[in-house]
Image (tube, grey):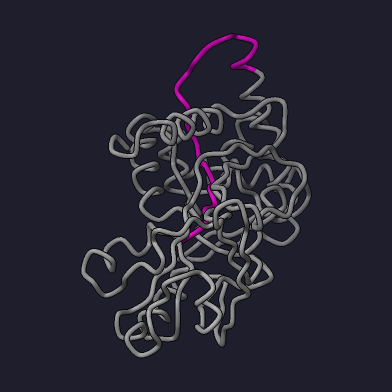
Amino acid sequence: MEYIDSLRVFRSVVEFKSFTRAADTHGLARPVVSRAIAELEARVGCRLLNRTTRQVSLTEAAERFYEGCVRILDDLDALEANVANQTREPEGVLRLVAHTTATMNRLVPLIAGFKRAHPKVTLDVTLTERPVDLVAEGYDLGVIVPYMLTSETTIIRLLDRVRFVLVATPAYLSASSTPQHPSDLTDHLFVPISPSIRRATIAFRIGSEELTIPLRFDVSSNSPAFNREMVLQGFGIGVVPDAIVESELASGKLVRVLPECQMVDDGIELQLAYSNRTLLPAKVRAFIDYAAAFFEAPAALR
């Protein structure tokens, strides 16, 4: 087997974690795949894969080899497509990381639509709320919020804004009084996003003035979903994305606090992040274009 072909087979084995699936993907018999990996290991002079009856994984020595392999194959595919000026169907594994809460009610329709448009692309999706380094961790793309990005070798594209609202349980407001003016919030406890991520203040526009309210709190976290649950337990007023409390507001479990008042900074950017490489693989370019069109469409049509 040619060296480039063996690299493609090796990549498929790693990404599918299966010799059988890699063989099916390339239209090869399983023994041919096993032989290709053995020849590749002999060429580089070390064992690349740990094999057990249940799983296949990279050896420690092979991790950097795999990362280099991915870069070479992606650049080669992109170069061939660019030179030939062709629009062949995107394929392969697309590794995507997304912010768990900020993409709620958005990510599944986005992925489902993309898969229907590009059925040959396999998606490996990781949901998290921690900072990530796209390049070091091997992600092709990130649908993230600003604090998550730790790598500077990326391009950022604005997709949408996640809007925050103030909510509380009727029982909490009954026991603690319902705020009638932003200044009343100083008498209340909050369940905010961790101060390391978002400042523990809320600013309101009152006429031509701004009123900044420092938030008192006993519990904070990096997870809006966790904060919502704490608010439902009556631990204060939550500052949460509106998308994650739609059903609770509709059922009356939660109510808006000061909905008529305008917060100065009532949202956070939802961004698409990807490598700043000149040549992007077709699968990455296809997702970028699809995501841009998806978020440009009216919400009712998504």
Say if the magenta span includes residue 91: yes
Q: How many marks?
A: 0
| Residue 48 visible within the image | no
Is 209 displayed left or right of 252 in the figure?
right
Q: Nearer the viewer, residue 234 or 15?
A: 234
Residue 193, position as x, y percentages in the image: 57, 70
Q: Residue at position x 56%, y 87% from top? A: 218
Residue 286, position as x, y percentages in the image: 50, 28
Residue lying farthest to the top in this orientation:
84
Residue lying farthest to the left in this orientation:
251
Q: Residue at position x 68%, y 25% from top? A: 279
Q: Nearer the viewer, residue 274 or 77?
A: 274
Residue 86, position as x, y percentages in the image: 53, 11
Q: Quadrant of the N terminus?
A: top right
**Quarter of the view holding residue 158:** top right
For residue 30, above or below residue 192: above
For residue 124, above or below residue 159: below
**Quarter of the view holding residue 195:** bottom right
Q: Residue at position x 41%, y 79% from top? A: 231
For residue 87, above or below residue 181: above
| Residue 209 visible within the image | yes
Residue lying farthest to the front in this orientation:
207
Residue 149, position as x, y percentages in the image: 68, 53
What residue range appears in magenta? 80-101
**Quarter of the view holding residue 11:** top right
Q: Quadrant of the C terminus?
A: top left
Is 271 displayed left or right of 29 in the figure?
right
Residue lying farthest to the bottom in this orientation:
175
Say if the magenta span includes residue 126: no
For residue 74, above or below residue 199: above
